[in-house]
Image (cartoon, grey):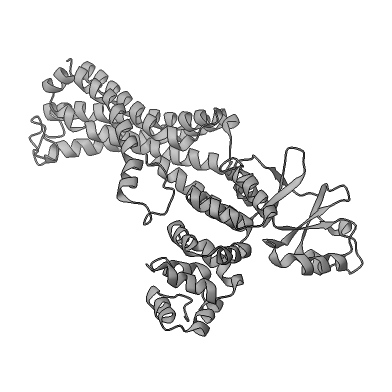
């Protein structure tokens, strides 16, 4: 326990030996999430129920929240109504709502039957907010103070009501008409004079979000203004909840995971990797693989059209993979930057022309550098025999290999590939700007539309340029 970790075996041994005092001590010194991870591997739900009955609810509330959804389902099914009601009472409402979103309908129904009527109404309201909106992640458990209160009165109010609130570090100030007029940090309140009115020390330059605002936008606001909590307003401008930093961290993780998954053509997983079955993982991957397979038809079609020309100059086929791979890699770099910038709101589609000019200059420099190196490297490949060219015989030691007939035969191939690579890299980077910016302009997720279209466009463009120039250079 010195390293603040606990194993499944240690937990089970203490439960089997009914060492209640030691179990309670674990909850005092080990983070709840570490205990939940250990208990997630316990097969008998009765052992976890023993913990819930033994340890104070102030510790077990967070512990229960951190358990995997299937473990929660088993526990809820095994508890009596009174036991279930006791556990639910100690959970924050927003954490409870998050749990209910992952549980089957019959389990949700039982849970809602065992919470007070007023709280049930709040839960139902939160469940009905649009998924991934500010309303879906907000909590209704926060401290509200009146602007004409003194500092001493406010502190007394917090001591009376704040213990069961999700946060007291950011306080929300309202006037007598119930309008939000300011926010106040707890440290500013503590160091204020006792008779000083809150309206004189509160922050009036606060930011808020609307209940239907996207959660990713909320996360960006937290980052921009360095917030611990933010007020959520309804369409009438009334304060109906707050979002705290711990919920925003979950949002950042979720959104980042989603973007990475979409960029790699995988539908995001609802559960963690270990909790997802092989069949479910296959269902997430197969559709996108099929989509990319179908899009690959365009490349096959181009190759089919130029099939006869390839047979006339067989060496051309050897460089097709590097043309397609290099263009895709170059565009992938730019797409990653575009998606990151759009996600973090470093720029919007309105900055399109500024970005396209910047990327055009960068792409041109990269294309030239790649082309020059490719001209040299592909010549070396032919002279050394890495790529077979009968004109060079794969012999770099021939005295006249860099001049005369050898040189021009090798140069034609290397120059053709290098020129195609340069054009492909430049085009790929330009397309990699257009696709995410275009998707964002029409309110679509840039991550999901960019990669498959980029791959198809770059492959087809590179092949058309390659064989178009080959027809001129080799007169085929």
Name the residue furthest right.
Answer: 195
Q: Quadrant of residue 304?
A: top left
Percent across and percent down for residue 221 are: 65, 47
Residue at 17%, 29% in the rendered image: 317
Percent across and percent down for residue 192 are: 85, 67
Residue 66 or 472: which is nearer the viewer?
66
Residue 116 or 375: which is nearer the viewer?
116
Q: Is residue 222 left or right of residue 310?
A: right
Residue at 50%, 82% in the rendered image: 20
Residue 30 or 57: which is nearer the viewer?
57
Percent across and percent down for residue 76 are: 50, 61
Q: Quadrant of residue 393?
A: top left
Q: Is residue 285 left or right of residue 386?
A: right
Q: Is residue 134 left or right of residue 303?
A: right
Percent across and percent down for residue 295 are: 31, 27
Does residue 59 sit above or below 168 in this rendering?
below
Residue at 14%, 29% in the rendered image: 315
Count of picture labels: 0
- Asked whether the viewer can see residue 146, the reply is yes
Residue at 61%, 71% in the rendered image: 58
Residue 424 or 401: which is nearer the viewer?
424
Q: Is residue 165 left or right of residue 262?
A: right
Does residue 54 sit above or below 219 in this rendering?
below
- Locate the C terminus by quadrant: top left
- Asked whether the viewer can see residue 218, the reply is no
């Amino acid at each position: 326990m010195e390293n603040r970790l606990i194993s499944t075996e240690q937990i089970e041994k203490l439960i089997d030996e009914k060492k209640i005092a030691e179990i309670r001590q674990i909850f005092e010194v080990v983070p709840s999430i570490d205990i939940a991870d250990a208990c997630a591997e316990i097969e008998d739900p009765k052992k976890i129920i023993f913990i819930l009955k033994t340890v104070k609810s102030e510790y077990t509330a967070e512990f229960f929240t951190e358990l995997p959804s299937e473990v929660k389902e088993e526990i809820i099914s095994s508890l009596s109504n009174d036991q279930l009601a006791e556990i639910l009472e100690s959970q924050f409402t927003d954490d409870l709502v998050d749990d209910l979103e992952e549980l089957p309908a019959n389990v949700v129904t039982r849970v809602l039957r065992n919470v007070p009527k007023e709280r049930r109404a709040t839960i139902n309201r939160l469940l009905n907010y649009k998924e991934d909106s500010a309303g879906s992640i907000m909590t209704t458990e926060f401290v509200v103070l009146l602007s004409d209160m003194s500092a001493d009165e406010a502190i007394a109010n917090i001591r009376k009501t704040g213990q069961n609130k999700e946060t007291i570090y950011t306080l929300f100030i309202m006037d007598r008409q119930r309008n939000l007029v300011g926010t106040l940090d707890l440290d500013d309140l503590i160091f204020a004079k006792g008779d000083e009115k809150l309206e004189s020390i509160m922050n009036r330059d606060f930011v808020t979000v609307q209940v239907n605002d996207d959660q990713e936008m909320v996360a960006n606001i937290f980052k921009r203004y360095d917030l611990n909590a933010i007020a959520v307003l309804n369409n009438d401008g009334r304060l109906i909840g707050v979002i705290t930093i711990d919920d925003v961290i979950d949002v950042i993780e979720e959104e980042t995971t989603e973007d990475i998954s979409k960029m790699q053509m995988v539908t995001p997983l609802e559960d963690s990797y270990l909790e997802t079955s092989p069949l479910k993982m296959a269902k997430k991957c197969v559709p996108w693989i099929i989509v990319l397979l179908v899009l690959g038809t365009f490349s096959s079609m181009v190759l089919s059209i130029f099939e006869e020309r390839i047979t006339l100059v067989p060496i051309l086929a050897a460089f097709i993979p590097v043309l397609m791979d290099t263009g895709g890699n170059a565009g992938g770099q730019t797409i990653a930057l575009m998606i990151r910038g759009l996600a973090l709101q470093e720029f919007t589609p309105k900055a399109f022309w500024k970005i396209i000019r910047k990327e055009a200059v960068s792409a041109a420099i990269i294309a030239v550098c790649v082309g020059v190196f490719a001209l040299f490297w592909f010549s070396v490949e032919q002279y050394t025999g890495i790529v077979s060219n009968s004109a060079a015989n794969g012999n770099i030691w021939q005295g006249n290999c860099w001049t005369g007939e050898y040189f021009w035969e090798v140069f034609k191939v290397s120059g053709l590939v290098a020129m195609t690579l340069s054009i492909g890299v430049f085009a790929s980077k330009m397309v990699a700007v257009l696709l995410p910016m275009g998707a964002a302009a029409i309110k679509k997720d840039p991550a999901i539309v960019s990669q498959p279209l980029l791959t198809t466009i770059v492959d087809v463009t590179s092949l058309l340029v390659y064989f178009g120039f080959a027809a001129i250079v080799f007169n085929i």
